Image (cartoon, helix red, strand yellow):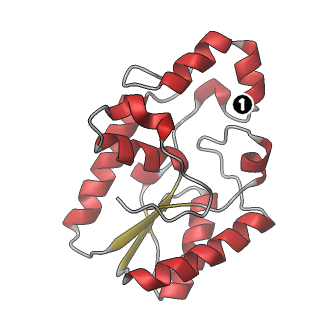
Amino acid sequence: MARHGQTAYNAEGRFQGTLDVPLDDVGLAQAHALAEVAAGHGIVALWCSPLLRARQTADVVGAALGLEPRADARFAEHDTGTWTDRLKAEVEAEDPELWAAYLRGGEDWSFPGGEGFEDFQERVVDGLVAMTQAKELPALVVCHRGVIRAAQAHSHIRGLDTFHEWPVPNGALIPL
């Protein structure tokens, strides 16, 4: 799995959720660096989130690998509900208890007016199962930090309680 390159929202510490936010110049450079790293992994299939930042990254990687990215909505980022387009620092200052609950994660967490972690993880795992059943491996999924964290938490004994423990920098290749 790989996280998309940086956007202005990432740099600002702002929730993007399902907004179509483009890569910034740093993000484009990260996409090219990711393509170089991915080239050494024998990847035969490329999947991506349909959101712009992931599609842009996947297009750069795909061009380097000679692969056409396959967009799959199951690899889209969380619907962050009423937190979408807001600075994380604002959300934390406005409601420290709710912010602490978000950081604790767990299967019961849901973004206010948005998607819950358990449903989100189920969606991501369904996408990964479909990808592996396509029998074109190794495959790469260009997606989002939340998607990668949900996949990692799925394989961990503590599950979604570990959601925020997984570091996933922009442009990083994260093996599962």
Q: Amino acid at mark 1?
A: Lys
Vertical arrangement, residue 133 with respect to residue 103, above or below? below
Task: Tell me which residue sits at (63%, 76%) in the image.
Answer: 33
Task: Tell me which residue sits at (45%, 36%) in the image.
Answer: 163
Please state which of residues 146 and 126 is positioned toward the viewer in this rendering. Answer: 146
Residue 49 in view in this figure: yes
Vertical arrangement, residue 112 with respect to residue 73, above or below? above
Task: Name the side, left or right, on which 49 lies relative to 45.
Answer: right
Q: Position of residue 44 (x, y in %)?
A: 35, 81
Please state which of residues 130 and 149 is positioned toward the viewer in this rendering. Answer: 149
Q: State which quarter of the image contains the C terminus.
A: bottom left
Q: Position of residue 24 (x, y in %)?
A: 77, 62
Vertical arrangement, residue 86 with respect to residue 129, above or below? above
Pointer 1: residues within 10 angstroms few (<14), some, or many (20+)? some
Q: For mark 1, give the secondary structure.
A: helix
Q: State which quarter of the image contains the N terminus.
A: bottom left
Q: Position of residue 142 (x, y in %)?
A: 49, 63
Which image quadrant is residue 27 in? bottom right
Vertical arrangement, residue 50 with respect to residue 61, above or below? above
Residue 111 in view in this figure: no
Task: Tell me which residue sits at (80%, 43%) in the image.
Answer: 12
Q: Position of residue 153 (x, y in %)?
A: 36, 40
Please state which of residues 50 and 120 is positioned toward the viewer in this rendering. Answer: 120
Give the total of numbered labels. 1
Q: Which residue is mark 1?
A: 88
Task: Tell me which residue sits at (19%, 64%) in the image.
Answer: 133
